[in-house]
Image: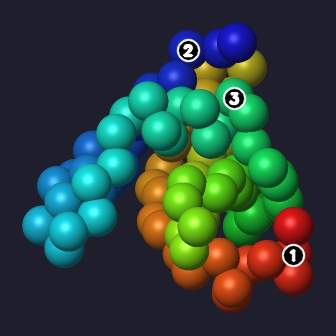
C-alpha cells in the first residue's frame, strides 16, 4: 500500500469531531481506505471510501490517489440509514 498522508484539513477534522463527541482515530481512517465496504467516484477524480463503524454510523473518507501516495482530504461520519441503500 502507498504511504497515506493527511491534509491539514483532515488533521483538524479529528479535533472538530472529538469536540462534537465523535472520536475517530487515524487507524480507522487508514483501515477505511485499505479495506472499505464501498468506494465511489468523488469530485475532481477523488475517491470516497466508506466503511461501517458501528450499528448506526459509517465513516466516509475523501482521498486522492497520487502516484506515490494517498492523500486524505477530509472525512466525516454519516448515519448508516442514509447510505445503506448505496452499499
Q: Position of residue 32 (x, y in %)?
A: 62, 41
Q: As rendered, which of 15 and 21 lies closer to the eye?
A: 21
Q: Give the distance between the C-alpha atoms of the residues marked 2 and 1, in whole angstroms.
A: 28 Å
> At x 34% / y 49%, what residue is drawn?
24
Q: Position of residue 60 (x, y in %)?
A: 59, 60
Which residue is the site of mark 2? 3
- Mark 1, Cα crowd under 10 Å, few <14 / some 14-19 / many 20+, is few
The quarter holding residue 19 reads bottom left
Q: Are marks 3 and 1 in contact (CB under 8 Å)?
A: no
Please tell me the numbered disc located at residue 32.
none
Which residue is the site of mark 1? 86
Q: Position of residue 37 (x, y in %)?
A: 79, 49
Please tell me the numbered disc located at residue 34.
3
16 horizontally vs 58: left or right: left
In the displayed image of the protein, which residue is found farthest to the left? 19
Among numbered discs 2 and 1, the one appearing first in the sequence: 2
Above or below, comparing residue 27 to residue 76 in the picture: above
Among numbered discs 2 and 3, the one appearing first in the sequence: 2
Picture quarter with the C terminus: bottom right
The quarter holding residue 54 reads bottom right
Amino acid at each position: 500500500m502507498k504511504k497515506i498522508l493527511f491534509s491539514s484539513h483532515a488533521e483538524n477534522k479529528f479535533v472538530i469531531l472529538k469536540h462534537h463527541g465523535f472520536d475517530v482515530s487515524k487507524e480507522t481512517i487508514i483501515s477505511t481506505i485499505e479495506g472499505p465496504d464501498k468506494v465511489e467516484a468523488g469530485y475532481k477524480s477523488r475517491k470516497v471510501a466508506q466503511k461501517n463503524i458501528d450499528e448506526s454510523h459509517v465513516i466516509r473518507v475523501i482521498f486522492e490517489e497520487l502516484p506515490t501516495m494517498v492523500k486524505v482530504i477530509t472525512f466525516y461520519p454519516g448515519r448508516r440509514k442514509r447510505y445503506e441503500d448505496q452499499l
